[in-house]
Image: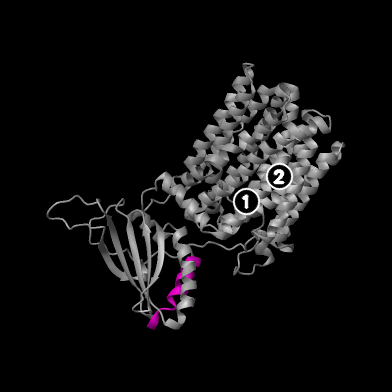
Amino acid sequence: MTETPGAEESTPTDRSRSGIGAPLRDATFRRIWGSSLLSNLGQQMQAVAAAWTMLQITQQADLVAMVQTASMLPVMLLAIAAGAIADMYDRRLVAISALAVSLSGSALLAAVAALDMLSPAMILLGVFITGTGIALYSPAWQASAAEIVGVKHLPAAVALYSMSSNAARSVGPAIGGFVIASFGMVAAFSVNAILYIPILVALFLWKRDVPPPRLPPERLDRAMLGGLRFVGYSPPVMRVILRALAMSLGGAAVYSMLPLVAHSILGGGPEIYGFLLGGFGLGAIGFALLTTRLHDWFDVETIVVGCSLVMAAALLVLAFSPFAALSVLATFAAGASWMVSISTYNVSVQISSPRWVSGRTLAAFQAAVAGGLALGSLCWGLLAERFGITAAVCTASALMVITALLRFILAMPRTTSAEAAPPPSSDPVVKMALTGRSGPIVIEIEYRVHVDDARKFYHAMRDVRRSRERNGAYSTSLARDISDPKLWIERFHYATWNDYLRARDRPTVDDRKWRDRALAFQIDDAPPRVRRFLERPTGSVRWREDTIDPGDVLRVPVSLTTIGSH
């Protein structure tokens, strides 16, 4: 993976110890990763069973493609909420609860199949429930990887996570096709339900050290908005997410069209479909092992552009090849390009996000990928139903070429670590009776800057403003006194006192650098004057004779202090 700028040069021995197998030295990670391999195997078997059953029941391309849509739609719809829950509560308990939901969906499909009551609606419902559990589980587990193995080994942990998924994809479909042909759909759905048990046991054995929270959890809606705000005010993260969305729209053709390619173009059955998916998984595994080498040889932009072009070529082969062996090679190339690109996007998002919001940024990334897969699968299915399978797959190939051209308008950022800055050295002085829900809280900071430095100071404060907004502030403004041009006033709000206290703990090292750069313009190195107010809008204070008239806005100063503790 791309190394963090400023990282110390490592010796060959250090590099070998921090290679792709380094996270497996941790017993907790090893248990969860190993059991997740079994769970992913069961999920792939269910995917084959659901798609092939739908094909047998309906013979309709759009309904077959909707199996993939039903699987990915929960991730798109619930990802932000799931990420917020992962950041707010014990991630271990969140993961256990989520997997219990997925197990219930698999058990439902097995029961319905055993009772011979399978229908398109029941298949889509069972797949949707299973996908709902995965949507809740994925941000909680992936955001936990850094705390288990450390940020240093995070790229290797992400690669191993992808290898687990793709190793199952390489053999799961083939096994699934064999199980379906030999024992029927009931067995395939039942095996998936059973294979959730090992990972549930591994999570129960994880003795997670949960530090007591200093503040109560955020409300879910505010936590979700906080995550979206952070992504919106983080251009590098936003560019990565948009690139991943574009990649998944085209890549959805591989997932959704393979049953139709196996059946209509290659004239095969579930075994051929399994082999095609197996080729995809093998390509992903093989290139997961080479990910570190690829990042040593090429920059991130070259890697993701190359992956888009390889995927485009693979889709063209699938559209026209009548030979199963050649189509398997095409899926191998597609799997390699998909794994390397998505893994690169994933690591870029994780390393660029501070821990307080990592679950939510991961969820936004996963929502973009899942949304692209769900929407793409639906579009390619409808296109195949109207114009034919070959036309749909060729259109997806053209879209992958367009994805490669996005480098000119959405360039990949350099991967930098969002290292947390030291917490404030002191708490704010409070001489009023405030509760966590008191608010809105208004912060005003007065700077004195030489007139000649006005333009430079203004541009430095643009970065400060973005930093404050992505950490929870709103209604930010910067004003200059027309009677004293040296005086500047920065003003911003927080909804509640607890929101303000949380924001004090959130800045990263980069946030502090931006603020220090603005502070460097302060005249005579005197600290800026910081004032905190509890805003009182009209009607917020009940009228009595002995109360102060709130007027339009009554500001009650909380304290006067310096910028070091604001």
Nearer to me, 187 or 492? 492
Q: Is residue 291 magenta?
A: no
Q: Which mark is residue 158?
A: 1
Q: From what the image shows, is residue 254 above or below residue 215?
A: above
* Residue, far right: 323
> What type is the residue that disc 2 sits on?
Gly
Residue 190, quarter of picture? top right
Quadrant in the rendering for residue 260? top right
Q: Is residue 150 visible?
A: yes
Its colouring scheme is: one colour
Residue 143 image offset from top left, x and y in percent: 53, 49
Residue 135 pos. (x, y %): 55, 40
Q: CA distance from mark 1 to mark 2?
A: 20 Å
**Relative depth, front residue between 73 and 147:** 73
Q: Which residues are magenta?
A: 509-524
Count of numbered badges drawn on the protein:
2
Could you tell me which quadrant the C terminus lies in? bottom left
Residue at (77% x, 40% y) in the render:
393
Which quadrant is home to the N terminus? bottom right
| Above or below 204: residue 233 | below
Please tell me how crowded label 1 is: few (under 14), some (14-19), or many (20+) other residues with Cα within 10 Å: many
Q: Position of residue 120 (x, y in %)?
A: 64, 24
In screen coordinates, is 41 left or right of 216? right
Image location (x, y in percent) of residue 565 = 35, 67
Dot 2 crowding, Cα within 10 Å, few <14, some 14–19, many 20+: many
Closer to viewer: mark 1 or mark 2? 2
Amino acid at the residue labelled 1: Val
* Residue in the picture at 60% in, 64% down: 4
Residue on which the image places disc 2: 251
Number of the label disc, if any, that sits on residue 244: none
- Magenta span: predominant SS is helix
